[in-house]
Amino acid sequence: MKSKNHILLLLLLLLLLLCASLRLFEVFLGLIALIPLFILIRHSFLDGSFKIRLLSIAYILGSINCWIIGFLGCVYIVSNSGYEIAEYPLITMFLINLVTWGGLIGSLIAKPLKIITNSKNIIFTKLSNHLIKKAFNITLLIFFVFILSAHITGYFNIRFEIGTKIPVGSPLYILQGLSVFMPLVFFFAGASLSYPIFLKRNILFITTPIIGALILSLTGGREGSLRVILYFLVGSLGSKIKLKQIRTLILTFIPLFIVIIAIIGSARNIEYFASTDLASRVELIYQVAVGEIKPNVVTVNEDPLYGTLIRMTEPTGQLVIDKVFESEQYIGFQNLESVVTIFLPNFISGGVKNLSEASERLKDYGVRITEFTNAPITLMADSFERWSLFGVFIISLFTSFYLSYLGRLLNNIKNPLFQYMLLISFSFRSLRIYTNSILTLINLVIYEFGRDALLLYLLCLLIKKIPDGKQNRITS
């Protein structure tokens, strides 16, 4: 193990020297920003604290996905098409280092590392077969009900017909609030896998996330498909298959997801939302997949690769970073007074929460915001606009500290079923924290986490109270 670590360290040093010699300074800083994530993951396995740090790891990973993978993709790939993502890319890469190193330090403060020589490296304790079976069947039924309700209420056409502002108390609003239930079936599908992986009974569980990803892609979005595959892969960590086979699943599903988002990205450029008929969308996706129809890529904006990288990077946040770096004008605590409304649920407050302040601020930077568009300011840009470099580091430190401390609390939950549902749901939310403003982050960790925990607890009670006899009838 030590020799492998030494080899990886040597390779990293060689890459850093190569990037410096080729004057690839953005890549150089990007590689340095990856180091805190590797440290956190490696030591989390060594001291058995992976579950505790899972939310913090997801938060750092999401930030890296945005500001290193997506950003550098735009800098070195999309820029060849004439698009420039940033005026000062080195500043952005310096800021992401503040995010990742602040995230590492925050997690270590919340849970110091301990050297455990005989650690078993247990990620998830195995659930009993009958409990997994019950949970899979019930959540599968919930998924079908969710999809049927989504079709009836127009959820698949929300981007085209309604936009980003859903009326409080409407069926779509309620459906969106209950969406925490929808992807759990894929987590339990992964947890249901048996050794060896090529057993016939595994076919159902392996095809479940593929079908689910394709169904959710009918909304025209890619996040739903990503959630499906991540839930399945994380669920497989608690299954009875071996680690080597889990690696095979990861190497299979990640490229599959890339193919799906590429096809959806291409289909969206061919009047994807012009028809509210889902059958027409299915046919269009099929025609794009087999090459019968190809999108007309006239400008860089219509290129699927461009669209994917831009969605990963959120250029609106980069616009703020560039302008603030030039002006050196910071807004401090401006617009944060509405934090007091966060403690009220929307159905009580009547939807008066002022969580759209980030979008309003973006209008000052020339970003066109409509009811059909939602441009995030991003946490890194918001922190930078408020309190400069110090703000980026401190906000990341406190965010990671909170998530790791929350992980400690979740680790103490005696009910493993409830614990796992919270871990996977909160982890996916943490993966998307980088898109939040400071105000929406506070709303997430105080209100939405609490709401989801209550809903998942009620689901856990339902799963445990349904007798096996009734559950067998669901299976049949």
Image: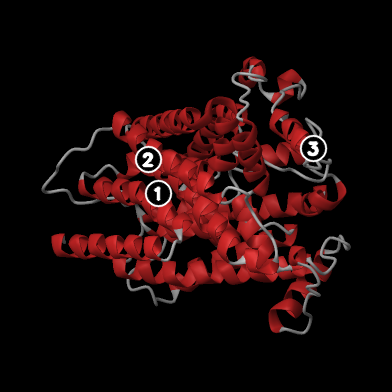
Whether pointer 1 and pointer 2 mark residues with C-beta atoms closer than 8 Å, the reply is yes
Q: Depth check: give the residue in front, 52 or 236.
A: 52
Tell me the tag on residue 166: 3
Q: Secondary structure at mark 1?
A: helix
Residue type, numbered disc 3: Ile
Foreground mark, 3 or 1, reads 1
Image height of 231 relative to 384, above or below = below
How far is mark 2 from mark 3, CA to CA?
Answer: 37 Å
Q: Residues within 10 Å of mark 1 (few under 14, many from 20)?
A: many
Tell me the tag on residue 101: 2
Q: Secondary structure at mark 2?
A: helix
Q: Is residue 25 left or right of residue 322?
A: left
Foreground mark, 2 or 3, reads 2
Please tell me which residue is depicted at 19% across the width and 51% down the height of the picture: 120
In primary-sequence order, the first of circles 2 and 3 is 2
In primary-sequence order, the first of circles 3 and 1 is 1
Q: Depth check: give the residue in front, 329 or 67.
A: 329
Q: Position of residue 169 (x, y in %)?
A: 78, 30
